[in-house]
Every structure is written in structure tokens, then in C-alpha cells.
Image (tube, coloured by chain):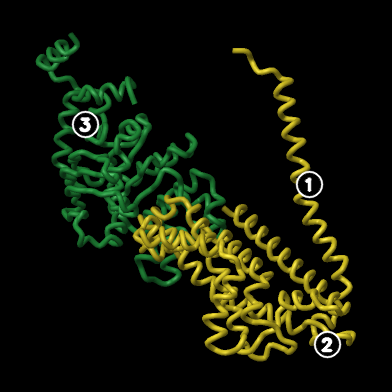
Chain colours: A yellow, B green
Amino acid sequence: MRPRSRAQRRAADAAIRVAMVPAALIGIAVLAWILGEVIARGVGALTPTFFTELPTPPGMEGGGLGNAIVGTLLMTLLAALMGTPVGLLAGVFLAEFGPSSRIATTVRFTTNLLMGTPSIIIGIFVYSVLVLPLGHFSGWAGAVALAILILPVVMRTTEDMLNLVPDELRESGLALGAPRWKVTLGIIFRAARSGLVTGVLLAVARVSGETAPLLFTALNSFYWPGSLSRPTANLTVTIFNYAMSPYSDWQEKAWGASLLITVSVLVVAVLARFVIKDGRERA
Amino acid sequence: MMMATEERVFVQAPSEVAKQHAREIEDVFRLPAKVTVRNLNFYYGGQQALFDNSIDIPALRVTAIIGPSGCGKSTHIRVYNRIFELYRSHRAEGIVEIDGENILSPTTDLLKLRKKVGMIFQRPTPFPMSIFDNIAYGVRLHYRGSRSEITDRVEDALKRGALWDEVKEKLCEPATALSGGQQQRLCIARAIAVEPKLILMDEPCSAIDPVATSKIEDLIETLRDSYTVVLVTHNMQQAARVSDFTAFFYKGHIVEFGPTTKIFTNPDNEQTEDYITGRFG
């Protein structure tokens, strides 16, 4: 056996680098390009009235997407309120109470399937179980569709985060004479707190940009979302409609809405990172 | 050859050491047993880990459990508070009586059992909360009391855990900010705060530096007065230093049990002697 030569090792190292760096750069470049394009085209549309006023008919200058902003916020919030508790509880079940039970294995598998289900299928599903029987598109149906999308993400991250908590911590809680549920709520949740919050934030960020499920459920509207029992304005479907329209004013508004969503998602993602960092420093 | 000399010595005149051993052995039988284990068998799924363990743990003494890795030391004490039940496939059979009550019976109140039997783990396990709340957590589980009563109890436990002077200024800081040795003493204080009778320590110093270890050993010395302590340890010097009685485990069997001085100077069993003298393990 001969010792490996230094030159050989260096050559291999250089080759890997040459392949790796451009790959990383392409990834970053695409993101930068999207961001640049959205900012360049969208920033002009973000006037104060964009946030406060109702849309104007095509051809009329001015107006805004206040109703869509409120609608998106409302539906996302409702979806988070519906999806998060169920997701959290299911995740707790998977991680803490029946990790290897038959129900848990089944639930875990179906969760993975649900996570991989295209969002348009969720939209059609909610359309057929809520919109058709009730006879009209509604904000509620939109929120339900988004909640279905949030559910598996929260479930999986909850399970993963709880699994990261060392068993010794559970054991020492139980060894003090605490019942299982108190250990889970008082100790394990606290230990996994930052991870759980991050999971919820990322899930919400993800669905806030969904279009397809809303297209079939909340549809869209030109009015303020007075009641969620009616079609409800939202940013993503508005982008879809406006971007396809022939009116330059609408197209510009679509860019503005795109910028708004992108920035919001970015802010939430950065926020989530801070939560993780904070949790790591404390732990 | 060796044997012959020893026998002769014994026949001629019992040495001082032998007399002391004899007294200590008598002691074992005179001391009330805190834990009485009879024919304890333990299974990890289909794999048996403990074989017919029988032992009487003397009350208000420190009993060390020594033996090579994987010999069942931890497995054995994890039966005393039934913490093993966290894992479905783990199963214990036999009789483990604590204060005369078979704790393996299905009617045992687990929460009461675990209040009575405290446990310290290999790695310190501070809860993700303040130093104060770590101690108060257990107290609030088992007692109802005013804020000042709980504060008193926390202070008392931290004093008995030999940690008070180091943390009294920073009770509201997160417990995770303490050093490893301090965290382990915090865990001991946390266990003490719920007033257990029996304290199980599962290699409490294996993740801690020598200075912190000696502090914990000093602490164990002081615990002997009010608690029965069972200490699993890898470190034979530690067993020799702090324990009154020592049990040697090997491959799931209790090979020998007796006063620590006897086990370490004149064990009956050849395997024990080989282990003590460092021939294996």
C-alpha cells in the first residue's frame, strides 16, 4: 500500500469545490433575481391607499387592495387557530403517548401523504364538502382549506421537536412524581418551545402564499370581508386575477401584492430563525 | 497456596480486620431493610437483563452498586421507582418491597411511590425554567402551600443540596446557566424537596469534573443521616469512599453483597475480587 499523495487529495478537493460553489450560487441567484424583480416592479404600487382602499374598476386609477389584505390576514389567522391546536395535540400523541402504536404509525404515514398532497387537491376537496353543499364560496371554506394545509406541517414539526427532547428530562419529571400530562405540558413543551413556535410560524408562512386552495373556496371579492360566509377577498387570488388582466394598473397592483406577500413570508421566516437562535442560547 | 495461608491465619486468631467484618456483617442483618428485593427478573423485550436479583438495602445507609458496563446496575434501580415503565417493552417480575409494600403490584400509586423514591440521573437534568422553579416544581406537585411556605421549602432544599450559597443571589435565572456540577446538585435538591425516603442515584458523577464530584460525594455523606441512598457507580474508588454497603453485579446477577470494607478488602467471591483488583471490567 502506498500513502495517498497530497497532490491527489488537493485535486479532488478542488474538483468538488468547482462543482459546489456554482451550484450554491445558482440557488442564491435565483432567489435574488425573484426578489429583485418583485421589488423593482412592486414597490411603486405600494402607496398608502394600496393598504387602505377598495379596488377600483378596471381603467380607473387609484384604489387599493385593503380588502384583500384584511381577508388574507383573517383567513390565515383563522386557519392557524384551527390547524395549530389539532396539529400540536396530534404531534404530542405521536411523540409522547403512542410512538410505536399501530394508530401512530398509520397517522404518521397519512400525515406524510397529506403533506405531499398538492394544494389544489385540498382546494377541490373543500369545494366539494363545504362550498357545494352550502351553495356559495366563503371565507370559512378558505380558512378550512388553509387549516388542512397547516395541520400536517405542525404535526410533523411538533413530533420532531418533541423527539429532540432527551428522555432523561421526561424521566426526571416522572421520577419526581409528576403525572405524564404535567411533564409534557410543563417540562417537555417548555424545552421544545422555540422549535414548536418555529414550526407554527413556518407553517403559517407557507400557507399565506397559497393560491389554489383559495381559488376553489374563498374565491375573491371586490368588497370588504364583512362576513366570512361570503366570498372573501385575498391577496393570492387577486394576484392571479390581476396579473392575467389586460389593465396595466391591475398588473401593477398584482406586483405590489406579490411584493407584500414575499416580504411578509420573509419577515415570518426571519422571525422564526430568531426564535430558534434565542432558544438555543437559553438551552 | 494463597488459600492455605489465609485459612491458617483465620484459624490461629481472627485479625482485627476480620473482626470488624464480622461486626459489619451482623449489622447488615440487624439494620432494618428499606428495600427488600426477591427474585427480581427484568426483560428488555425478549432479552433478559436481570436474573433472580435478591437483596436487602439497609435503611439510612449508602449502598453502592458496582459492576462492569451493561451488568444491570441501572436497570436494577430503575425498578425501584418503576421509571422503566415509560418504555412499553420493558418488564419486571418478582417482588420489590419498599417499607414492606410490594411496589410492583398493579395497585401501587405511582405518583406516591415516586414522591417517596427520588432519582438522580447520569446527566444533570435541570428543567428549562428558573433555579427557583426547578425546586418549586416538585414541591407544588405534592403540596399545597402559600408562596412563603414554598419559598421556605425551596431555600431549605437548596441548603440541604449544598447549593444555596452559590445560587441565593440568582434564583430567578435559568437553571441551565449553572455549571454541570451545580446542575447535578440542583437535581439532588429538587429530589430532596419532595421529602423522599429513598434516593436512587444512577452514576450521578459520570458527567462531572473531579472537583464537582467531590462536592457531590460530600453531599451524599450528609444525606445518609436522613435518607436511604442507593448509588450506582462506575467508579470503584467512589463506592469505597462514600458507601456503607456494596453490591457487585455481573451479567444481571448479584454476585456479592456486603459491607463495603469487606467487599473491597476481602470479598468472598472470586469474580468480585477480579473486578475489584481490576482484572476485568
> In the depicted view, which residue is nearer to us: B232 or B243?
B232
- Name the kind of residue labelled 2 in the image: Thr
**SS class, disc 2:** loop
Q: Nearer the viewer, mark 2 or mark 3?
A: 2
For label 2, count other residues whose C-alpha is less than 10 Å away and answer few (under 14), some (14-19) or many (20+).
some
**SS class, disc 3:** strand
> In the depicted view, which residue is nearer to us: A215 or B264?
A215
> In the depicted view, which residue is nearer to us: A89 or B203?
A89
Quarter of the picture containing the C terminus of chain B is top left
User: Which dot marks residue B255?
Assistant: 3
Q: Residue at x 64, y 77 (%)?
A: A214
Q: Provide residue A197's location: percent of width, then percent of height.
A: 58, 64
- Name the kind of residue labelled 1 in the image: Leu
Q: Provide residue A147's location: percent of width, then percent of height.
A: 56, 73
Q: Provide residue A5's location: percent of width, then percent of height.
A: 69, 17
Between the residue at mark 1 and the residue at mark 3, the CA separation in whole angstroms equals 65 Å
Q: Provide residue A10's location: percent of width, then percent of height.
A: 73, 25
For label 1, count other residues whose C-alpha is less than 10 Å away and answer few (under 14), some (14-19) or many (20+).
few
Q: Are marks 2 and 3 on the same chain?
A: no
Q: Which residue is mark 2?
A: A56
In this rendering, the answer to whether A272 lies above or below A20 is below
Q: Are marks 1 and 2 on the same chain?
A: yes
Q: Which residue is mark 1?
A: A25
Q: Is there a contact, CB below 8 Å, between mark 1 and mark 2?
A: no
Report the side of A201 relative to B132 (left or right): right
